[in-house]
Image: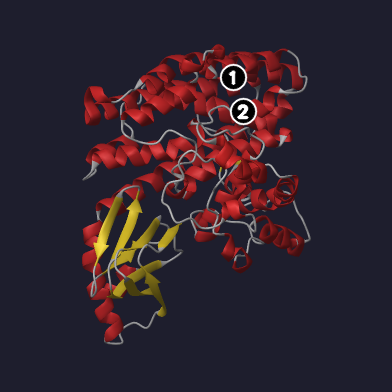
Amino acid sequence: MQTKTRFSQETSAALKISDYDFFKSCLIEYGKCNLFKDTEEWLLEDNPYRRTLRPHIFHHLDFSKPLDRNNLLTYNSLTANRTLLTVYESNFVFLPKHDFVRKREDFEKFYDPKIMTLGHIIRPWLERYIFSFLDSEISVTGNWTAAAVEEYFQEYAETVKNTQTNLVMETIEGSTDPVHAVKTFLIQLAGDFLVESSAMSRNILGSYGSLQSELFKVVIDEYGYGVHQTKHSKLFEETLLSVGLESTPHSYWQFYLTSSLMLNNYFNYICTDHSKFFRYLGAIFYAETTFIKFCELAAKTMKKIFGSTINNRYFLEHVHIDRHHSRMVLEKLIKPAIASYGEGIIPDILRGFEEAKLISEIADRDFIDQVHWADDGLKYKALALPVYKKIQDGSINPKMQQFIEPRGELSVTHVHDGDELCYIESGVMKFVTGDDRYTILNAGEGTVIQHNRLHGAIIESEECVYNIYSIGDYQKCLS
């Protein structure tokens, strides 16, 4: 059976707000909270309130025109996604594991009514900016019936069941540093999994009959039926600890890829806006069904790399429980919902399924590209001098910015929209491509920075003078 969902270029009918200047002023005001300013540390251990948003550049950024499919991983998108997740999570309760007294001021600022109000104002704009592309990418057509939906979803479940490989796992196993690749993968999951089911819990409030009780059954599974040691987020903490990673929420905030933030934001988006409830049903079916084989293959890959030292209980538990959840969502939520509320809700259900699928595929590709780029650190370092020679001999004349920074100066992780050349005039830079992964650049050396690839830097000498050249496409520069 072919899907009746097609991709198109329809004009978005999403939320329209005329007063962009008002949004921008509220965004800048939101960014004045010192919790969101640049940090001098790579990790933010056990402080879920401090989240680097790079607010000093808010006034330079334009969020008035929504993203399209070709620019989802840009600098603007990374900033918007970091900010939107912060806004969403101000509705969650976060308490540090240790030293609350010392962090109480941060706690109070994070939940300050002014910050919360500003967050509510800027949220619709950020959602429009990030997710409007879905309206032009996905269109549900055809005369769908309840039977056709069931057949389509059953076929998908069978396809998942018969899947034997996963490109993400193949990329991890084929990495030049598979241990780091696994850790990078776990870090991408941590943004959501350490607060697992918090987004979906937004949908268990209110009153909508037996569907509400059925959804609650899924939620209480995620929460371990009130037994903390079996709560899924607790299981994931144990996985992180077993490979030497921190287990507190957002310790690795700087190392979340743009697409990982977007995927996390998507589920918050459709759960915060209850008019998208039926869209959520399709999205959660996709997630619960896909996760069965995903977790099975992930567990095998991690055991292959770490042996018996890794705690794989989180993934093994989901192989079991998500078979049950997939059936529950289809039989106890989707089919009864269509029976109760009519076939007019089917396009929303299918849209949610296809949207979750599309963003997940984008996130997989982004992760794979990041691993390949980090693996090729020495290759991109070697490419720097040929590109620099092209600049010196006048073959190319890119825009250049020079920076003079002292020892310990940390450049918060970010991306560039085009390829860049980083060239060191004097001093030493540690060029960072992931948590605890870097390339050392000395005077007369540099590296090509691929567009959309997450990176940062820290100065390792008393002073470092370096130039950033906006070269566009490095391959064209060398042709």
Foreground residue, 342 or 255?
A: 255
- Measured as percent of width and height from the top left, residue 443 is found at 24, 74
- Measured as percent of width and height from the top left, residue 281 is found at 62, 26
Q: Which residue is mark 1?
A: 219
Q: Secondary structure at mark 2?
A: helix
Q: Amino acid at mark 1?
A: Val
Few, some or many residues within 10 Å of mark 2 (<14, 14–19, 20+): some
Few, some or many residues within 10 Å of mark 1 (<14, 14–19, 20+): some
Colour scheme used in the picture? Answer: secondary structure
Cβ atoms at labels 1 and 2 below 8 Å apart: yes
In the picture, the quarter occupied by the C terminus is bottom left
What residue appears at the point 24 percent right and 80 percent down from the top-left corner? Answer: 389
Instruction: Point out the tag, 1 or 2, that comes first from the N-terminus.
Output: 2
357 sits to left or right of 478:
right
Task: Tell me if residue 387 comes above or below residue 314 in the rendering.
Answer: below
Q: Secondary structure at mark 1?
A: helix
- Measured as percent of width and height from the top left, residue 223 is found at 55, 19
Q: Amino acid at mark 2?
A: Met
What residue appears at the point 32 percent right and 69 percent down from the top-left corner? Answer: 474
Q: Which residue is mark 2?
A: 200
In the picture, the disc for residue 20 is: none
How far is the residue under mark 1 from the one under mark 2?
A: 8 Å
